[in-house]
Image (cartoon, rainbow, N blue to C red):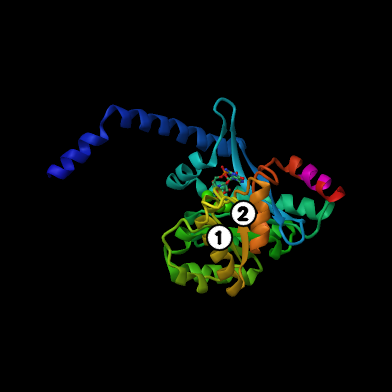
Amino acid sequence: AKEKGRGKREFFTGDMNAFTLERLKLEGFLRKAVQKGELEPYFQPQYCLKTEKILGFEALVRWNHPELGLVSPMQFIPLAEEIGLIDEIGRFVLFESCKQLKRWHDSVAPYLSVSVNVSGRQFQRLSFVYEVKEAIETAGISAEYLHLELTESTMIQNVQYSISIMQELRELGVRLSIDDFGTGYSSLSYLKDFPVDYLKIDQSFIRHLSDDFFNTSDAAIIKAIIMMCEGLSLSTVAEGVETHEQMKLLQEYGCHTAQGYIISKPMPACEASEFLRNFLSV
Ligand code: C2E
Ligand code: CA
Ligand code: CA
Ligand code: CA
């Protein structure tokens, strides 16, 4: 009872009330945002370190609110997950990304891929595989060009169920990535059981990567991950690459793909198209 009382008092502090109010406001705004079409996928290029070509884009959702301005997905995705709006948002990003990919296939480059983030809740829904199939068919793209990014925490919620869904997705032809690798608590032994194609090395490992003699631990971890992936026939993607030096080192270590501000920030579809055209013409 004592424990309960303490918890209760904490809940009703002034700070908490302000926080709750802010949140309620944001929640209301977000519900309207989805209806009013204030959400938009941005696209960040994925660059092949072996062939020096653009392989595709990762779709990253943006919320452009008339008063609040550009709201970060780090702020609204967790909220959307809690209040159940993530299903609608996830579906929107998935369908829009596939449609945009079709435009690129028809106009600039028929080999590009698009990588879409999938939240845990979205993935656990019974209709998810059907939704993916529908998105591919509606857009008229070939399934192999759609990549889905799943985090470790999503996959280990219910391992057997997750593996079966991942297998169904692979049967459709879709490719799968493990996102934010190295930040979760999952065991390495799961890696051999999950039917995935790509592993994204989290940007926290890349951030301090440099030629600096005194910082060798991140380099050691990155090299070990790349070697392990080679053994498992997984392709590696480094996220958050910001400097030429990092890119050069990753290339040296045998990392396959780089993504980060050094290549480009995420951009609206029209800017991404222009980026592609410029890139292809040089
Ligand atoms: P994430 O999937 O790990 O995406 C990478 C994040 O790093 C993105 O942040 C991207 O803009 C940022 N980034 C890319 N290159 C660099 C770099 O060189 N330096 C730095 N410092 N950051 C870089 P963003 O767009 O704010 O998205 C944050 C997170 O929100 C994503 O992390 C993802 O977990 C989630 N998210 C975004 N879009 C979606 C979506 O459509 N669905 C779901 N479920 N989650 C999404
Ligand atoms: Ca991602
Ligand atoms: Ca990531
Ligand atoms: Ca992340």
Question: Circle 2 sits in a helix, a strand or a loop, which is it?
Answer: strand
Q: Which residues are magenta?
A: 273-278
Which residue is found at the position 43% from the left and 67% from the top? 187
Residue 222 seen anywhere in this rendered image of the structure:
yes
Q: Nearer the viewer, residue 201 or 114?
A: 201
Is residue 277 covered in magenta? yes
Q: Quadrant of residue 17?
A: top left
Residue at image location 75% in from the left, 57% down from the top: 112
Sequence-first tag of 2 and 1: 2
Q: Position of residue 130 (x, y in %)?
A: 59, 63
Estimate the x, y position of residue 92 in percent, counting from the top left.
Answer: 61, 48
Residue type, numbered disc 1: Ile
The answer to which of 263 and 100 lies nearer the viewer is 263
Residue 150 percent location from the top left of the image = 54, 59
- Disc 2 under 8 Å from ligand 1? The reply is yes
Q: Residue placed farthest to the top in the image?
A: 67
Tell me: residue 16, above or below residue 213. Answer: above
Indicate the quadrant where residue 109 lies.
bottom right
User: From the viewer's perspective, is residue 193 above or below residue 179?
Assistant: below
Residue furthest to the front in view is 213
Query: With respect to residue 114, does 17 lie above or below?
Result: above
Q: Mark on residue 222?
A: 1
Q: Amino acid at mark 2?
A: Val
Depth check, front residue: 243 or 231: 243
Between the residue at mark 2 and the residue at mark 1, the CA separation in whole angstroms equals 24 Å
* Secondary structure of residue under mark 1: helix
- Residue 169 position in % (x across, y down): 59, 67
Is 112 part of what is drawn in magenta?
Answer: no
Q: Which residue is mark 2?
A: 116
Instruction: Work out whether 39 lies above or below 173.
Output: above
Dominant secondary structure of the magenta stretch? helix
